[in-house]
Amino acid sequence: MESVGSIIVYAVIALTIIVCSVLAVTTRKILRAATYLLFSLFATAALYFQLDYEFLGAVQIAVYAGGIVVLFVFSILLTSKPGDNTPALASKKRVLGGIGALAMFLVAGYSLVSRTSMLSAVAAGGNPSMTEIGTALMGTGHGQYLLPFEAISVLLLACIIGGVVIARKH
Amino acid sequence: MFCCGVYGFITRRNMIAILISLELMLNSVDINFVVFNRFLFPGEMEGMFFSLFAIGLAAAETALAIAIIINVFRVSENIDVRDVTKMKF
């Protein structure tokens, strides 16, 4: 993050992510929560693009923002009419949720700040090209990822079969 | 982002809203991996591959969770987590 422009871009993206995720968990209408989730995912993809990981950003947009949010919208429209509000939450649960979130924030913040020097200058990071990603996914050497690749295809097959079994008509 | 997900997971009663908070938590962990990869290990790509597989896993798990929720909705017309109290037998 050497120039002022990239710092401003990062601040805008981070602010969008934080605001949209807070709104997504505190709104009362469900369809608005899905829309705020969509904005959060787009802002996350923008963050990946800014860090020079173009393949990951493209996968994030295609899978998360394009697939999962569409699934959410379908299921929301199937299970509740969009005009309803969810009823107001009990204050005991809200206090418990707030305490849990605050505890996680303190733990994660402390471990992050005490172990890394947050404002040090960044080394010029590598930008993995598509040939590097391709050979890394298909190789069996030291830093290569053939086994997780095959494992995730078996998992996706199991997921498809499980989904069909769960959702069939009796 | 993770703390928003935790808050939403504990306080929401609609099952789909709980899933949305879970997605927020998964996403925040992906960002963390990628940022650590970029700033602490500039030559290697392991954080990026971990996030790649995590995105795929999250997609599979969300699809199955939505299938289960729709099945529950077929039985009892309600997806409030406090009302689903009976097991099958």
Image (tube, coloured by chain):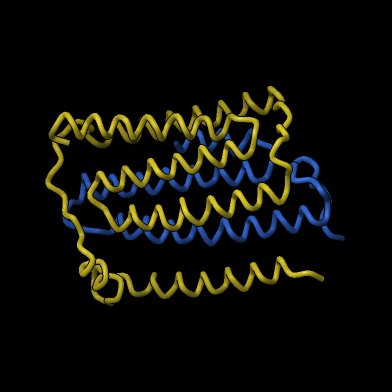
Chain colours: A yellow, B blue
A2 sits left or right of A139 in the view: left
Q: Position of residue A141 (x, y in %)?
A: 24, 75
Quadrant where the N terminus of chain A sits is: top left
Q: Residue at x 50, y 57 (%)?
A: A67
Whether A2 is drawn above or below B69: the answer is above
Whether B44 is drawn above or below A155: the answer is above
Quarter of the image holding residue A43? top left
Q: Position of residue A16 (x, y in %)?
A: 39, 32
Front residue of A125 and A49: A49
Q: Position of residue A163 (x, y in %)?
A: 64, 67
Quadrant where the C terminus of chain A sits is: bottom right
Quarter of the image holding residue A82? top right
Q: Residue at x 22, y 31 (%)?
A: A7
Q: Residue at x 30, y 56 (%)?
A: B48
Whether A48 is drawn above or below A114: the answer is below
Q: How many marks?
A: 0
Front residue of A15 and B49: A15
Front residue of B54 and A2: A2
Q: Position of residue B49 (x, y in %)?
A: 32, 60
| Residue that lies at the very extreme toward the right in this rendered image | B89
Whether B61 is drawn above or below B85: the answer is below
A141 sits left or right of A103 in the view: left
Quarter of the image holding residue A39? top left
B56 sits left or right of A5 in the view: right
